Image (cartoon, grey):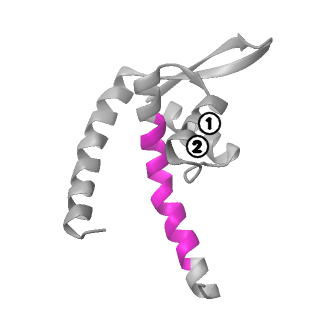
Amino acid sequence: MLGKSEEKALKKLRKELRSGLYSFLVLSILDREGELHGYAIRKRLEELSGGKLVPSEGALYDILKSLKKLGLLEDSWAEAGGRPRKYYSITEIGRRVLERLREEVRVIESVLEKLEV
């Protein structure tokens, strides 16, 4: 069991680590699966991570808003199940940025393998 200061440090570092990771994963999901609404993106993250990497709804929508502001995503409204939903899709700029991020992730994976993490 962790002490109070250890819990605080873990919470802060986990938040920082996951912040960029969520953006990368959202871009990757939309690149692979096409246009999705926010709830579907969140469910997909939950499925892929076995429930271990699931941002709060607020955090996810902040990520989507930020990625849209950067020009990496676009959104549009469509009706699903009788109610309007905002759907997100990756842009061409988003695809190019994602490819560069994938290169970065490969470097990180290589370092982690060398550290035997």
The reply to whether the C-beta atoms of the residues labelled 2 and 1 are less than 8 Å apart is: yes
- Residue where numbered disc 1 is placed: 43
Left or right: residue 61 versus residue 9 is right
On-image quarter of the N terminus:
bottom right
Query: At 58% across and 70% down in the image, what residue appears?
Result: 11
Query: What range of the chain is rendered magenta?
Result: 9-26
Q: Secondary structure at mark 2?
A: helix
Question: What residue is shown at x 23% (from left), y 70% (from top)?
Answer: 115
Classify 63 as above or below 77: below
Q: Amino acid at mark 1?
A: Lys
Q: Is residue 59 left or right of residue 45?
A: right
Q: Quadrant of residue 114?
A: bottom left
Which SS class for mark 1? helix
* Residue closer to the observer: 112 or 27: 112
Residue 32 in percent (x, y) is at 41, 25
The residue where tag 2 is placed is 46
Q: Position of residue 65 (x, y in %)?
A: 58, 36
Q: Residue at x 28, y 34 (%)?
A: 99
Q: Main secondary structure of the magenta part?
A: helix
Residue 64: x and y in percent read 56, 36
